[in-house]
Image (cartoon, helix red, strand yellow):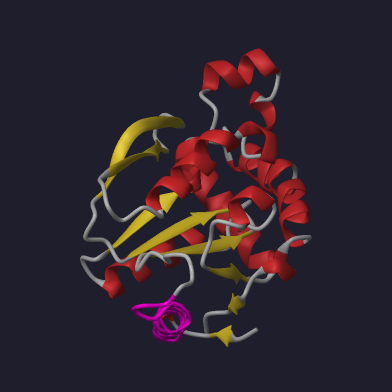
Amino acid sequence: MVQATSLTEVAALIEQRRVDVAGANPVGSRLPHVSSRLVVGIAGEPGAGKSTIAALLVAALGPTAALLPMDGYHLPQARLRELGRRDRMGAADTFDVAAFVSAVRAVHNSCTTHYAADFDRDIEEPVPDALTFKPELRTVIVEGNYLLHWPEVLELLDLTFFVDVPADIRQQRLIERHVRFGKSPADATAWALGPDESNAALIRLSAGRADHVIRLD
């Protein structure tokens, strides 16, 4: 496991993985076909900066890279209320895991165009088919809390990273984010140290499944 301390190092690890895959499946090989598209997972606890890192990485990799965020597969607010889970939105059982697995599996196929959901933070609702993945893409960056926790997702990822950030920094980021999206400082703190931290404890248990760790300076 390599500790990457810059986006340049992360991008280099992605390109090395591409070389390794190509070497394991040379032209004329009798091995099953391996797609030239890599699906890379960026996982971590709430507030670790996954979304920012993933977006910057896609920008650094250029127009043949695209982002698939796990948050697009939140269950809708109405469904969460029906299930009695709205007060802990963001927990592992508040996502449509089967639909997310289908989306990750689909983007492995580089032969046709696929569509996936995104998430609107202003209204806290998923937006179906908001993202387009065209055949020319060489890299899809998948970003989310539970990529390493759900085995059925992990097995679809060609390369995985866990973003490691000190708890106090994560929590402060979360409080600021919750305030920015409408919570009072008191409610933001309660959510960051309550549901968010419970989710973080679960996510940390799967950190060792990552291929590499990201600790940005």
Q: Position of residue 171 (x, y in %)?
A: 65, 57
Q: Residue at x 61, y 57 (%)?
A: 154
Check the image and report above or below for 146 versus 3. Answer: above
Q: Position of residue 99 (x, y in %)?
A: 51, 34
The answer to whether 70 appears left or right of 67 in the picture is: right
Q: Residue at x 69, y 25 (%)?
A: 85
Assign the N terminus to one quadrant of the image: bottom right
The answer to whether any part of residue 66 appears in the image is: yes
Q: What secondary structure predominates along the stretch shown in magenta?
A: helix
The answer to whether any part of residue 49 appears in the image is: no
Q: Residue at x 68, y 17 (%)?
A: 83
For the residue pair 91 and 181, the one nearer the viewer reads as 91
Check the image and report above or below for 158 versus 8. Answer: above
The answer to whether 213 appears left or right of 7 in the picture is: right
User: Which range is magenta?
Assistant: 8-29
Check the image and report above or below for 164 versus 100. Answer: below
For the residue pair 96 and 157, the one nearer the viewer reads as 157
